[in-house]
Image (cartoon, helix red, strand yellow):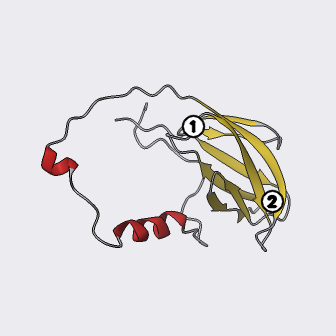
Amino acid sequence: MRWLLVLVAAAAWGQTVVRQGEVIRVRTPGPAAEARMDGRTIRLFAQPEGGRLGLMPVKALTPPGSYPLELLGSDGKALSSETVTVRDAHYRTQNVVLEKSTAELKPSPGEMDTVEVFLKAVSETRYWQEPLALPVPDA
């Protein structure tokens, strides 16, 4: 399976159109500390040239439609909101047949709670730098 990371420039803060599975480059000249869309919150990091920047992933299974992308202050209150339109990426599907013993596996007690906490964690540290590169050449 190939993964494709596409940065969508939002140079002029306005309506942004992305496909499922893409990443929105959220840049703001203002004091916003975070951005939130579809239940996911990301940190916006101060930039040397001024302003703030963060990367908002759009899940591959996000239903096509319009979603509010909110810029949040350090107090968590919405400073502004813009509409992001998610388009169908038309990913190919594949049927996979699992053995019954594999299909019946269940998470251990508390495992899904741990996963949920991990997925909602927002790091105070920026672990990426630009320019980003595709994980596989010519992907």
- In the displayed structure, would residue 134 be above or below residue 78? above
Q: Mark 1 is on which residue type?
A: Pro
Residue depicted at x 71% and y 58%: 35
Circle 2: is it few (<14), some (14-19), or many (20+) Cα within 10 Å? some
Q: Is residue 63 left or right of residue 66?
A: left
- The quarter of the picture where residue 124 lies is bottom right
Residue shown at 62% from the left, 51% from the top: 56
The N terminus lies in which quarter of the figure?
Answer: top left
* Residue 41 at x, y percent in the picture: 64, 60
Mark 1 Cα within 10 Å, few/some/many (few <14, many 20+)?
few
> At x 31% / y 29%, what residue is drawn?
94
> Helix, strand, or loop for circle 2?
loop
* Total numbered labels placed on residues in the image: 2
Query: Residue 10: in sight, yes or no?
Result: no
In depth, the one of 84 and 33 nearer the eye is 84
Q: Disc 1 marks which residue? A: 63
Return the x and y of residue 6 as percentages of the image width and height.
57, 38
Residue 77, compared with residue 68, is above or below; it is: below
Closer mark to the observer between disc 1 and disc 2: 1
| 1 or 2: tag closer to the N-terminus | 2
Q: Which residue is mark 2?
A: 51
Counting from the top left corner in percent of width and height, residue 20 is at: 55, 36
| 48, 9: nearer the viewer | 9
